[in-house]
Image (cartoon, rainbow, N blue to C red):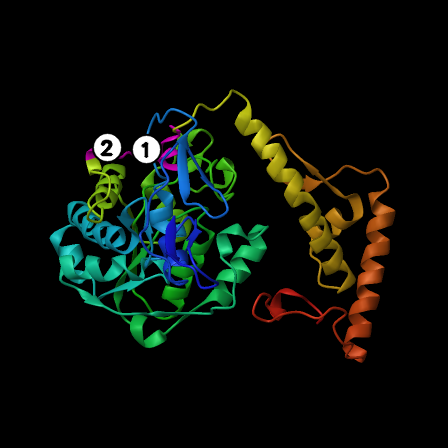
Amino acid sequence: MGSRSSETGEGTDYMMASESVALKQLGFGNFVDILPGQAVIIRKGGGPVAYQIQDKKRYAPDIFEFCYFARPDSIIDGISVNLSRENMGYRLANKIMRTLSPEEIKSIDVIIPIPETANTSAPCVAARLKRKYYQGFVKNRYVFRTFIMPGQKARQKGVKRKLTAMDEKFAGKNVLLIDDSIVRGTTSREIVSMAREAGAQKVYFASCAPPITHAHIYGIDLASPDELIAHDHGRDRAIEEIAKHIGADRVIFQDLEDLKAACSEAVVSGSIPPEERDFEVGVFSGEYVTPVDEGYFKHLEEVRGETRKMKVLEKAREAVANGSADQEELEIAAKGVKVTENGKIVPAADDETGHQLHTLVAGGEKRRKHSHEENTPPKDRMDISLHNFGDFHGL
């Protein structure tokens, strides 16, 4: 919470936000953290009053905010996001030195970040390892975050549109790529592929976060546990398997204790002492700061699947209409979709699928022929800053 002199008259304005940068940009200062269990009431003409409506059990901000979500110029719960990511870089470099041999480290020609979150950590890794640092990827600012796109194909296409590799930074080199985290592995696999296509000889991949093995239940919907690359049928997938899956020569993850220390050491002056602060690390350990009822995760998967179901069905029908549908999209458009117990979306059973499928194929071919003969305008206007025309076939 911040305050400033009122710009509309006498008195003081107050504002609350999850990150300090939102307050700072609007001219607010005198930041105060709202502690767990507190409610703040601001009456007209008066100042804020904090009430402790629930006993504070722990002070445990979500550590994934510092790994990925937050802007680097923010201070959250008294911790500098920028400094925490610099610390992550130095500690990750220490882990790399413990993992790779001195000969392997010397063979690394360049260290390259995956934009943009890793841009802060990667130079620190390079400085500690005494290796060159380059910006090797150019980011398309008009592409959404790919890990939250619905569907594997959309995420794969999104990565290609999101990043472009500069060949001269990769050609003939052994490269160490630094990223903030690895979620499903889709982005990482595409990035490694892009590095090799640009001419990289060896590709090492290092994550500033530990392996993500469990669902994120307090913030953004990362993925189903079954979709997480580090979660494999209830067990933690071996690091070697992950490296093979994304196509890297080696994969190195930050240790959880090092991640916690990196954030604890980034506390700004006057904030709560580090010994009184803990972190929510459930995505890395499965141990959450609040009790989780039995069956909650199954319920979460069902809800997640239901919310994605209509998006998948709509996308399949659009692909059929544009004549670009593959076999799976044809089946989904013909049969509809259903959600399995673990939240996966699959074509629904339908005894009349054959007739519907034939009709859809014929309709799709007709539409495709028509689109080639006549350049029809888009049906709806789109804001190019929010959408990518390449995602909409036939437009």
- Compute the Cα span from label 1 to label 2: 7 Å
Q: Is residue 121 magenta?
A: no
Q: Quadrant of the C terminus?
A: bottom right
Magenta residues (range): 275-288
Which residue is tagged 1?
A: 59
Pointers 1 and 2 in contact (C-beta within 8 Å): yes
Residue 293 is left or right of residue 375, and the answer is left
Q: Secondary structure at mark 2?
A: helix
Which residue is tagged 2?
A: 276
Residue 344 can be seen, yes or no: no
| In the foreground, 123 or 174 | 123
Label 1 crowd bin: few (<14), some (14–19), many (20+), radius 10 Å: some
Label 2 crowd bin: few (<14), some (14–19), many (20+), radius 10 Å: few
Residue 277 image offset from top left, x and y in percent? 26, 35
Disc 2 residue type (three-letter): Glu
Residue 161 image offset from top left, x and y in percent? 51, 67
The image shows residue 258, relative to residue 145, as above or below, that is above
Q: Quadrant of residue 363?
A: bottom right
Residue 364 can be seen, yes or no: yes
Residue 389 is left or right of residue 24, and the answer is right
Residue 337 image offset from top left, x and y in percent? 72, 42
Q: Which mark is residue 109?
A: none
Taking the spot 41% from the left edge, 32% from the top edge, the residue there is: 51
| In the foreground, 44 or 119 | 44
The image shows residue 242, relative to residue 276, as above or below, that is below
User: Of the residues under marks 1 and 2, which one precedes in the sequence?
Assistant: 1
Q: Is residue 283 magenta?
A: yes
